[in-house]
Amino acid sequence: MSVLIDNIGELVTNDEHEGDGLLGIRRDVAMVLEGDRIAWIGPNAQKPPADTRIDAQHRAVLPGFVDSHAHLVFAGDRAAEFGARMAGEPYTGGGIRTTVAATRAASDDELRRNAKRLVDEARRQGTTTIEIKSGYGLNVADEARSLRLAGELTTETTFLGAHVVPAGSDPDAYVELVRTEMLDACAPYAKWVDVFCERGAFDGDQTRAILEAGAKKGLQLRVHANQLTEGPGVRLAVELGAASADHCTHLSDADISALSGSDTVATLLPGAEFSTRSPWPDARRMIDAGVTVALATDCNPGSSYTSSMPFCLALAVRDMRMTPAEAVHAATAGGARALRRDDIGVLRPGARADLIVLDAPSHLHLAYRPGVPLIQNVLHNGVPQ
Amino acid sequence: MSVLIDNIGELVTNDEHEGDGLLGIRRDVAMVLEGDRIAWIGPNAQKPPADTRIDAQHRAVLPGFVDSHAHLVFAGDRAAEFGARMAGEPYTGGGIRTTVAATRAASDDELRRNAKRLVDEARRQGTTTIEIKSGYGLNVADEARSLRLAGELTTETTFLGAHVVPAGSDPDAYVELVRTEMLDACAPYAKWVDVFCERGAFDGDQTRAILEAGAKKGLQLRVHANQLTEGPGVRLAVELGAASADHCTHLSDADISALSGSDTVATLLPGAEFSTRSPWPDARRMIDAGVTVALATDCNPGSSYTSSMPFCLALAVRDMRMTPAEAVHAATAGGARALRRDDIGVLRPGARADLIVLDAPSHLHLAYRPGVPLIQNVLHNGVPQ
């Protein structure tokens, strides 16, 4: 089964060997998909026949968004907490425990329906790959359950037992539980292990202990680092070879320099700064220092309840001073790097047929037309959604 | 033909005689529409029969958004200018002339199609009333044509010949043209007259001359005031009894005090501040002083190319420190006040059946879930869209 997409006005390839600029832009091209892969890209005038056809009508075609940071297995919402915070109450992170109680009390089907609803919502907004973390179970059974359910929706599952110390637990005893029994129960369902390294959550030593235990179990590493304060998270992520340090809102010169000489991506989550009225990560400083940057939603019911990559991209341009091209790159190729994937976030023969057609002639419109639903078609594994 | 909407979890009435708080919220109610009007609102348990039924499934129902400030009759876009500005080039307003040239060169059908596309896009995002201005013709024939085409899409049409002095024209001669021959040609198609009162556009005396001439022709008044600098616009709007002073980004104490003692609404346009990286209007200060505030998109291809009222509402909460309830009120009842309408922006028997069903249990979600398309159903004049 082959699909021809022709009359593509602007194709964002993210292929460094093709096209112009950071995004590898090609114009007036066509593309053929075979099964779940891209088979051919070339001038529109040379397009071959195929089984079915999508006429892009001179619109822009981009890789599907790669949302490398989302917390989707939970129950309930925290709209009232949000309303109170917007009326002036500071965000402390304590609200996570509200969601933990609701999540533990929910049935598998309730959790599954809620996560599926959010994945579908994200897909309609152009997200073709999404990472899903546990972290609202915080006991062996509910963390393992969360990851089992996440695995029904994505291959990018992350064990985040170390999200926060649950109410009433001794921190050191909880760390010990996470790195032994909980890890044993969760590892079969997880590709990644993550720790919220932050004052009030887990310190550098605790973070290292959990990440090293996860690595021994064959999990790859990512870290919630430097969200609320400067801390050891970013440097630890680099030292341990983590794929990504996420948030990066408060960075020292040493943090920037560690990231820029590494394979660790800085994953920026502007939805969290938006929804907590926090200062913005300094994306400009990171990019100018040579750090690889990704954008993700941080979709969760407490600090960033958005599933919209286009919204995050518009914030990154307006408030984090990324150019529109840098923001599009970070939301596609950057996310793929943060997940150590080379089959997504790029459009070239052999890559996965995950792509979006915009209702706009250029990728610029994603930032130029903020808030407007511009995702016209989404193809995931070559299949129109 | 009657429509029953039942199982409404939260109804935002904006009716000061019903329900709780600023939004007049009622819970667990049903509503009956007869033709283009609301016929009945009452407890869900007492719902009467009707010809057709919409099950709100315990979701929130709100008045449709009233977007009282939009520039939709134009051709072309200015994505490249936007990209350059985001890379650090300041916004001067000079780019309007680019759109004027494209608009003059376009056929009626091109202008009609583009405006219709934007009205439809806005409607899908919950806007049931939209004001449309001229202002990209800047000669007698093209201003009149713009208003004639706007009138095909809305009753809220605004003559903005005084948007900017066209290239090559003498300012005083242009003001004279606007207030005589151009006004004569445009008044039959316009309900409102508006002037961009700003340094570099039209000064206080010029603004007064045009508004007074418009009023003599039976047009009602609105003013682009105090967007880029403190100036005479706001006080002039109040003095002349304008329905609205729009932008209000730079206000003196005297401006605030003039607005608070008047029937002139302050219409805030956060999409413009977002897309030009400008300082935010101080909504908190205005509301605390008793000023009536509206939110609108300012949808235009130069400084705010968004048609999304939910996006503007989320910015108003995050960046202009409005509470979620204040922002919802400003985007509905506030817009209605800015258009001097009492049949929209409110849900009570006798009001127009313009309303939206959210894919969410509460109006809070519009700010709590920024960027996410949450508009599930739109009814305009009682008709599902």
Image: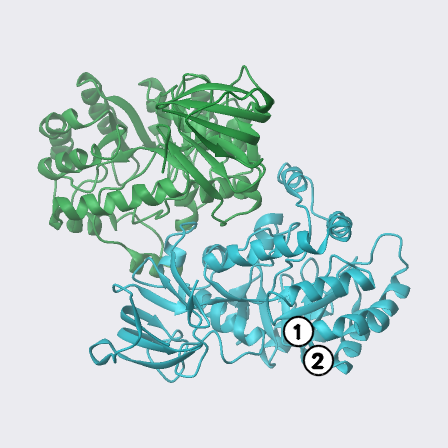
Chain colours: A green, B cyan
Q: Nearer the viewer, residue B43 or A314?
A: B43
Tell me, yes or no, whether dots 1 and 2 are on the same chain: yes
Residue B2 in picture, x, y percent from top left? 35, 77
Of the numbered discs 1 and 2, the one sitting upstream in the chain is: 2
Q: Amino acid at mark 1?
A: Ala
Circle 1/circle 2 CB separation < 8 Å = no
**Residue at coordinates 25% horizontally, 78% vertically from top-left?**
B49
The dot on residue B127 is none
Q: Position of residue B47 (x, y in %)?
A: 24, 79
**Residue B29 x %, y %:** 27, 75
Q: Residues within 10 Å of mark 1 (few under 14, many from 20)?
A: few
Asked which secondary structure carries label 2, the reply is helix
Residue visible at 17% across and 48% down in the picture: A110
Q: Residue B254 got which mark?
A: 1
Three-letter code for the amino acid on which mark 2 is drawn: Glu
Q: Residue at x 26, y 28 (%)?
A: A155
The Cα atoms of the two marked residues, 1 and 2, are separated by: 13 Å
Mark 1 belongs to chain: B
Which subunit holds the residue at mark 2? B
Residue B298, by quadrant, is bottom right
Residue under label 2: B239
Regarding residue A119, the answer to whether it shows in the image is: yes
Q: Please name which of the two marks, 1 or 2, marks the residue nearer to the observer.
A: 2
Q: Return the residue nearer the eye: B237 or B304.
A: B304
Report which quarter residue B265 is drawn in.
bottom right
Residue B247 in sight in this render: no
Q: Residue B200 placed where, x, y %?
A: 79, 57
User: Residue at left 51%, top 54%?
Assistant: B121
Q: Is residue B152 left or right of residue B141?
A: left
Task: Depth check: give the residue in front, A19 or A323.
Answer: A19
Quarter that holds the N terminus of chain B: bottom left
